[in-house]
Image (cartoon, grey):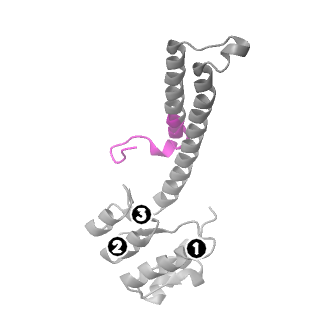
Amino acid sequence: MGLRVMMLTGDRPETAQIVAQAIGILPQDIRSEIHPAQKAEVVRSLQNCVGSQGVAMVGDGINDAPALAQADVGIALQSGTDVAVETAGIVLMRDRLTDVVEAICLSRATFSKIRQNLFWAFAYNLLGIPVAAGLLLPRFGVLLSPAAAGALMAFSSVSVVVNSLLLRQTFSLFRPSKQSIF
């Protein structure tokens, strides 16, 4: 996904190295035997890096809460401590780290839909309001009746809702189930 992934852990370096190697984290991106305040400081320093587009922190324990609060986006696992769950902006409903990738993909797709919806809403208003105000009446004899203008505005709202519902097609993994609310 083109993201830099780091491991911040209070565990011993040997343990961190084994886990990081298993999941593909580079050795220079491992910070072990660090305290909660140090985790928050690492997040803060990453936020201050030139070219940083934001920092997300994934955690599940009370030791992660300061870093979750400091991060631009805090992500907690459902089974995490109450402090971590309350501090995070996103709570994953399952205890699978692979859901972090899905959450990032979903958030990117959601922002894309928001941009699309804003574009179409502005396009409708940019064209509809001047026509409804009579801008085309003197030259072309075109004027929208209040009923037609209202219908176009309703169509605008319906198109935004339909476009947003297409997001579900993109994420077929997020079908409603007993464990998921999406």
Q: What's the CA distance linking mark 2 and mark 1?
A: 25 Å
**Front residue (pair 92, 178):** 92
Magenta span has 159?
Answer: no
Q: Name the residue under label 3.
A: 75
Q: In this view, does 101 lie above or below 5?
A: above
C-beta proximity under 8 Å, tags 3 and 1: no
Q: Name the quadrant containing residue 123.
A: top right
As drawn, 57 above or below 19: above
Residue type, numbered disc 1 = Gly
- The quadrant in which the C terminus is found is top left
Residue extending furthest toward the front: 138
Kindly report which numbered mark, 2 or 1, lies closer to the viewer in this rendering. Answer: 2
**Magenta residues?**
164-182
Can residue 49 be seen here? The reply is yes
Residue topped by disc 1: 24
**Chain-order first, disc 3 or disc 1:** 1
Q: Residue at position x 28%, y 69% from top?
A: 83
Q: For the residue marked with disc 3, what is the amino acid?
A: Ile
Label 2 packing within 10 angstroms: few (<14), some (14-19), many (20+): many
Look at 58% across and 30% down and name the residue there.
Answer: 125
Pointers 2 and 1 in contact (C-beta within 8 Å) = no
Ranked by sequence position, the earlier of labels 2 and 1 is 1
The residue under label 2 is which amino acid type?
Answer: Ala
Residue beneath label 2, please?
A: 65
Real-space Cα distance between discs 2 and 3? 10 Å
Give above or below for 97 relative to 122: below
